Image (cartoon, rainbow, N blue to C red):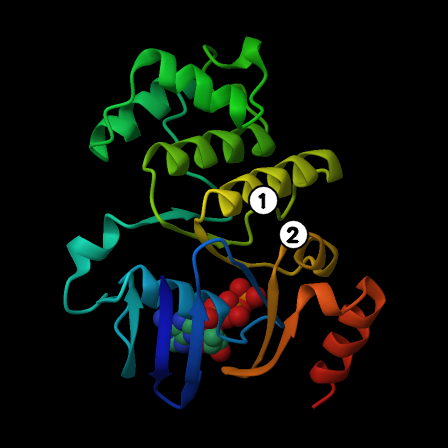
Amino acid sequence: MLEANSLCKVYGNTVAVKDLDLKVGPGEIYCMLGANGAGKTTTVNCFLNFIEPTSGNVKINGIDVQKKPMETKEHVAYIPENVMLYRNMSGLENLRYFATLGGSGCTEGDCHDLLARCGLQPDAVGKDVVGYSKGMRQKVGIAIALAKRAGAVLLDEPTSGLDPKSSNEFSELLLQLSSENVAIFMVTHDLFRAKETGTRLGIMRQGELVRELDAEEVSHSEVEKIYLEEMKY
Ligand code: ATP
């Protein structure tokens, strides 16, 4: 579903991503870890066609993102660290607006169901986003992503700044999505959540994927130990 083949991105003297090969299949949750500047966001941005690879390619659903950007966008939803919403519209209005824009044609009932499924408190649904916490905005963001019914979801540090309960609820939603065969690629610094939610974990260092782990085969403490070992170089 999501595929990077010998992906490279170079900025001047900086090799942001080097020879990255990656596959995320339906139902997989791939969590990408790595220090600041390791190349994680650059990878996501290539999948979103925000930037062009220097060489190699990325594919969504077998379609080359750079060759058919509009087509691949239909298959993917994106949740950034800070979901941007219209502050003077309610969560419901934002969802309705973005769902219509995305062509998914959600009914009023669908929108309510989605927001409830994403855990937005019923009394917040009709209130302006300006008064929402970050966790509430992220929940609307997930609802917008779900409304798109995309086969792949890309997330860039979506739980940064969320309290443990909201972060846990977020993980539950990702697990639900994976049970519906969605391919998920999440950039995160949260080793605990990555191990808890991910099916596979990747560790990037200076643009290279230096380690891949099967989440079931490692304990929380092993993930931390391996991560710290990789960061020594
Ligand atoms: P973080 O965890 O801090 O978000 P990251 O792993 O997502 O980091 P990237 O944002 O992908 O890292 O950056 C990878 C490298 O590419 C860094 O050295 C960064 O400085 C460089 N880089 C990213 N974007 C640009 C750009 N537009 N111009 C020049 N260099 C860039």
- Badge 1 local density, few (<14 within 10 Å), some, or many (20+)? many
Residue type of the residue flagged with mark 2: Thr
Point 36% across, 61% down: residue? 1
User: Toward the viewer: 178 or 84?
Assistant: 178
Q: Which residue is mark 1?
A: 175
Q: Is 209 displayed left or right of 225 in the figure?
A: left
Q: Which residue is mark 2?
A: 197
Q: Is 167 displayed left or right of 175 in the figure?
A: right
Point 46% across, 29% down: residue? 140
Q: Is 110 displayed left or right of 28 in the figure?
A: left
Q: Position of residue 121 (x, y in %)?
A: 59, 16
Point 41% across, 63% down: residue? 44
Q: Is 87 displayed left or right of 209 in the figure?
A: left
Answer with the quarter of the image where residue 8 lies.
bottom left
Is 39 above or below relative to 63? Answer: below
Do the numbered discs 2 and 1 sit on residues whose CB atoms are within 8 Å? Answer: yes
Query: Which mark is drawn over residue 226?
Result: none
